[in-house]
Amino acid sequence: MIAIYARVSTEEQLKGFSIAGQIEDCKEIANTDEWSAYIDEGYTGEILNRPALTRMLNDVDAGLITKVICYDPDRLSRKLLNQLLITEKLEQNQVHLAFVKSNYQNDAEGQLYFQVRGAFSEFDKAKIKHNTMTGRYRKAKSGLVVKNSGLYGYDYSKAENMYQINKQEAAVVQMIFNYFTSPDSNFKGVNGIARHLTELGVPTKRGASVWHRQVVRQILLNEAYTGTYYQNKHDTEGDYVRKQAGEPYQTGRLRPREEWVETNIPRIIEPKQFKIAQALLKNARRRHAGYNRHPYLLSGLVRCGRCGETMNGRRTKSHGKDYFVYVCKKNYAGAKSKGCGRMMSESKLNHQVWTTIESKIASSPQLKSLIYTPNKVQSQAEIDHLQTKIHHVRLAQKRIIQLIGIGDEIDLQEIKYQLKQLQDEEKSMLHKWQVLMNKINKQDTKPRISNWREVVKRTLSQEERRLTITEKQTIIRMLIQEVEVIHADMIRITTF
């Protein structure tokens, strides 16, 4: 049997290096109808571990093949060593090798030509790779985006080599950041946001209906949304070849910081809000670890200035009464450090921190810039999304109803089934829309703690009722990133 071997890599496919064209030319050399094609589509010529090539060599060992025809030596491989290994296998089994674009002879002169040709092919591949990488780097340095990485919130323009804002997706990105950074958000952490987006029916970049917490987390971590997009950041050299060869490789390797190329793209999130999100992500586990029966005002924010470990709230007994403290001590199994044992009175630390907060509010009106009041905006973005979905569902219902009048061949039972599903979907969307409308109406009539004037008025005025601990916690989390206990009478407060 005659075997025809053809191969194209992904890059060669884009350039129009046709599999069909290779086979057609090889068929002319075969000059018979008794042939079988072995095709590796989308595989690099730098590796031997290719499905069709492996299968062909196994058939050679089994004595099923008498001749192999290939369009060009670099279709067999672009590495000289691999070419020699393949030809040696064919020679051991007395299989004749022929090329369309090369007159291969199994003698000293022919082998020399074949080896020189292979060396040039390997050099050519390395040169193409170098030129491609150099060209991309120069484009990036000139301020262009050279590769579409599927960044959520943007569409990629090949004509302009630049990201353009996708309004619907950008609104979702803003919702995610607002949900996460807003002190009075209804959603606890990344997982709560992911569940909410899934319930709303917001599609992901790939069109999936389910949002995973890691996807939301990656969006919150991505500095590109502030308009600063880094290219040449990850070292992926050799990953593609190792992956196709079935060899282990490590993803996410970063190049040295000085090799990154900073590119400006349209901004979706303000840098200040992004900075707050990073600080909250860093302490997310501490902030949302759980709820104690006794509400510690500074839960998740206190750190020991002596050993650097976190300090947790704990109840002790003194003269038969409950006494609450923050203590640097870990009793749970698996703790990396047991802590140094430092203890601080909860009431004393609370007083020191809250006094500082009152002073800052009174003396620094500019702190207003740190407060985000996005809830009404968030709800409106959700309503816009739901209204769009309701509109599309109603259009789909109209199209199905129009089909009924086409003819008797229409399956009415199937039509009724599809119509019922669309009606149920519309009913669900309308219910969610009504819930959000009620939420907005309540926000219009109920004073919100994140309103700056409300905060200042109720914090400083002696005539107003005292703030609840929940309201105090809301204010503290607007302004404070961490409280470090240096000693009993000295603390260091890190603000956003």
Image (cartoon, helix red, strand yellow):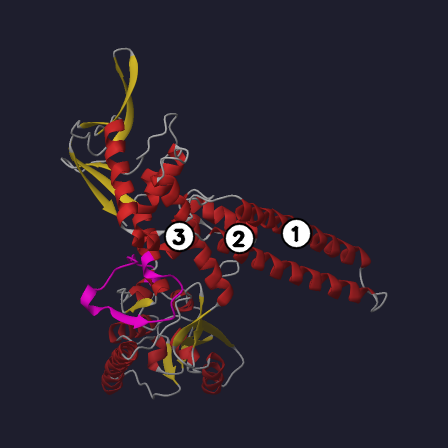
At label 1, counting other C-alpha atoms closer than 10 Å, the crowd grade (few under 14, some 14-19, many 20 or more) is some
Find numbered disc 1 in the image and state the secondary structure of the residue it sits on.
helix
Q: Which of marks 2 and 1 is in front?
A: 2
Find numbered disc 2 in the image and state the secondary structure of the residue it sits on.
helix
Identify the mark nearer the N-term, 2 or 1: 2
Could you give the CA–CA distance between mark 3 and mark 2, rounded to whole angstroms? 14 Å
Residue 430's label in the rendered image is: 1
262 relative to 434 in the view: left or right:
left
Which residue ends up furthest to the front in the rendered image?
A: 463
Q: Which of 199 and 369 is in front in this view?
A: 369
Q: Nearer the viewer, mark 1 or mark 3?
A: 3
Verify CB contact (< 8 Å) between mark 3 and mark 2.
no
Name which residue type carries label 3: Tyr
Could you give the CA–CA distance between mark 1 and mark 3, rounded to whole angstroms? 29 Å
109 up-or-down from 363: above or below: below
The residue at the point 25 percent across, 11 percent down is 319
At label 2, counting other C-alpha atoms closer than 10 Å, the crowd grade (few under 14, some 14-19, many 20 or more) is some
Q: Does the magenta stretch include residue 167?
A: no
295 relative to 360 in the view: left or right:
right
Q: In which quarter of the image is residue 353?
A: top left
The residue identified by callout 2 is 379
- Residue 349 shows in the view: yes
- The residue segment tinted magenta is 243-272
The residue identified by callout 3 is 372
Identify the mark nearer the N-term, 3 or 2: 3
